[in-house]
Image (spheres, rainbow, N blue to C red):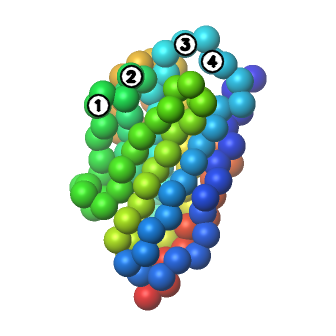
């Protein structure tokens, strides 16, 4: 069973930064892409960023482009989300996910395994 463990969430003032981490607890045996999604209260879960298995391609939701950076360390089975210039509208529970294929995807339903989520709160 693949398990994902997220960390790094917290409370930060607008304009501040946080770095989220997500570690896969067991080897999947496949070349997998990874993604970050978020869900604000009363809203649907939405795509934030994705990265291919080799880390050579990344894709972002428009509102985070230029502020967030997704990266990965395959030797550590870990993906990161560096979040800079945070805004109150970035407040949400952030989830990492594994897609059992080497290419990334913006589609929530394409992902096979999910973490438990970590809360990010940005105060104004």
Q: Which of 8 and 118 is in front in this view?
A: 8
Which one is in front in this view, the residue at disc 2 or the one at disc 4? 2
Q: What separation in Å lies between label 2 and label 1 (alpha carbons)?
A: 8 Å
Residue 43 horizontal/vertical position (percent): 48, 64
**Vertical placement of 9 versus 121: above or below?**
above
Q: Residues within 10 Å of mark 1 (few under 14, many from 20)?
A: few
- Work out which residue is located at the far bottom of the displayed protein and give it: 124
**Vertical placement of 80 versus 27: above or below?**
below
Q: In which quadrant of the rendered image does the N terminus lie?
A: top right
Residue 95 horizontal/vertical position (percent): 56, 49
Residue 54 horizontal/vertical position (percent): 38, 22
- Please report the residue visible at 57 percent of the width from the left and 48 percent of the height from the top: 21
Disc on the earlier residue, 4 or 1: 4
Q: What separation in Å lies between label 2 and label 3 (alpha carbons)?
A: 12 Å
Q: What separation in Å lies between label 2 and label 4 (alpha carbons)?
A: 15 Å
* Circle number at residue 30: 3
Which one is in front in this view, the residue at disc 2 or the one at disc 3? 2
Q: Quick one: SS at disc 3? A: loop
Q: Residues within 10 Å of mark 4 (few under 14, many from 20)?
A: some
- Residue, disc 1: 57
Q: Quick one: SS at disc 2? A: loop
- Residue, disc 4: 28
- Residue, disc 2: 54
* Circle number at residue 98: none
Picture mark count: 4
Q: Quick one: SS at disc 4? A: loop
Relative to residue 113, is residue 92 drawn left or right? left
Q: What separation in Å lies between label 3 and label 1 (alpha carbons)?
A: 18 Å
């Amino acid at each position: 069973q693949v398990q994902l463990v997220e960390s790094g969430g917290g409370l930060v003032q607008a304009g501040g930064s946080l770095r989220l981490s997500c570690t896969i607890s067991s080897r999947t045996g496949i070349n997998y892409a990874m993604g970050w999604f978020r869900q604000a209260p009363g809203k649907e879960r939405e795509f934030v960023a994705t990265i291919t298995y080799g880390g050579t391609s990344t894709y972002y939701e428009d509102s985070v482009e230029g502020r967030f950076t997704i990266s990965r360390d395959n030797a550590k089975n870990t993906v990161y989300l560096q979040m800079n210039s945070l805004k109150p509208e970035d407040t949400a529970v952030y989830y990492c996910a594994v897609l059992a294929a080497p290419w990334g995807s913006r589609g929530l339903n394409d992902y096979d395994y999910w973490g438990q989520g970590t809360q990010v709160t940005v105060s104004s």
